[in-house]
Image (cartoon, rainbow, N blue to C red):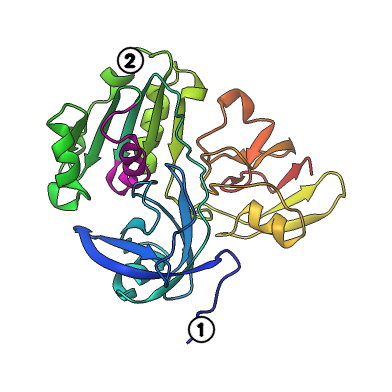
Amino acid sequence: MAVQMHADTQMPLRIVRAYDAAEGVRGFELAMPDGSELPPFTPGSHVKLQVPNGLVRKYSLCGDPAERRRYEIAVKREAQGQGGSISLCDDAQEGDTLPTSLPDNAFPLVDNAKGWIFVAGGIGITPIRSMIRSFGELPAAPWKLFYLTRSPQATPFLDELGALALKSRVRIHHDHGDPEKAFDLWPVFERPLPGTHIYCCGPRGLMEAVRDMTGHWSTRQVHFESFAGAGEVRPDDKPFTVRLARSGIGFGVPVGGTILAALREHGCNVPSSCESGTCGTCRTRLLAGEADHRDMVLLPEEQAGEIMVCVSRAKSAELTLDL
């Protein structure tokens, strides 16, 4: 039976392995149906999958980029999510076909750095694992991973990364859900290291903490990847109007929708990549109105005149964009 492909997907990949990677986390290995080579990807890349219930979701590739026959992903089952991860974790079986996009990278690894500091929170380990695996046995520069999770049972790739901890490259910390037992990252970032790049992926609170603690580092050295979906609804969200200054056209952005999606619906194709407010590709000039900034990119002094249209919303009734 033919698989119906979504517009964001191009390849029908087969699940050749499905397994429990940790408590509440499913791992999947995907391959071409005929076993041929897959398109190459770089560390930090992601693909979009059409899960069994038809939703399309983004997942980081967590395998070695040198492996050309299989893509690896690990998916946390989000019981309070919108159903994408539940469908994939509960319904996808070995042998099933998942329409899949070509790899894209909104979280690229700087390969000529003098060192790397990785901070992963829970399932945020996935793009960072790919980066670490790309180094092989002889990395070009020193690196260190701080892997923060709730418990050993909920920690994907614990055995693999625990082995690296014996070499002092990895620090694994479990807080068991107690904020008083959170790992103190300040000593890690207290002194900026020229040429060293920081990569952080995990829950919003962790990324905001890392952003605050690295305010004295160069912004070019600090990189974030978010798994929060665009359009995530907050209790005080309200619909608002976006007006395009060059044409004067105005249109609404509903609760649960995004400015980026509304722009596309009206024929305005703004460049985008991560669609989670971390890469900066969709940066757009804001001419009027007060934005509700939800990105990890803009500096405080930039927020009055710019907006990331993939995730940010409006505090005012209307925003005017330089489009």
* Residue 9 image position (x, y, % from top left): 55, 65
Most prominent secondary structure in the magenta stretch?
helix
Q: Quadrant of residue 149?
A: top left
Q: What residue do we see at 42% from left, 28% from top?
A: 211
Q: Quadrant of residue 23?
A: bottom left
User: Which residue is farthest bottom?
Assistant: 1
Q: Secondary structure at mark 1?
A: loop
Mark 2: amino acid: Glu
Q: What residue do we see at 55% from left, 49% from top?
A: 275
Mark 1: amino acid: Ala
Specify whether residue 128 is painted magenta.
yes
Specify whether residue 276 is painted magenta.
no
Q: What residue do we see at 33% from left, 32% from top?
A: 118
User: Which residue is farthest right?
Assistant: 247
Of tags 1 and 2, the one toward the viewer is 1
* Region in magenta: 121-139
Q: Which mark is residue 2?
A: 1
User: Quick one: 44 or 295, which is closer to the camera?
Assistant: 44
Q: Which residue is mark 2?
A: 190
The image shows residue 63, relative to residue 36, as above or below, that is above
User: Quick one: 165 or 138, which is closer to the camera?
Assistant: 138
> Does the residue at mark 1 contact the one at mark 2 (Cβ under 8 Å)?
no
Residue 138 relative to residue 292: left or right: left
Q: Earlier in the sequence, mark 1 or mark 2?
A: 1
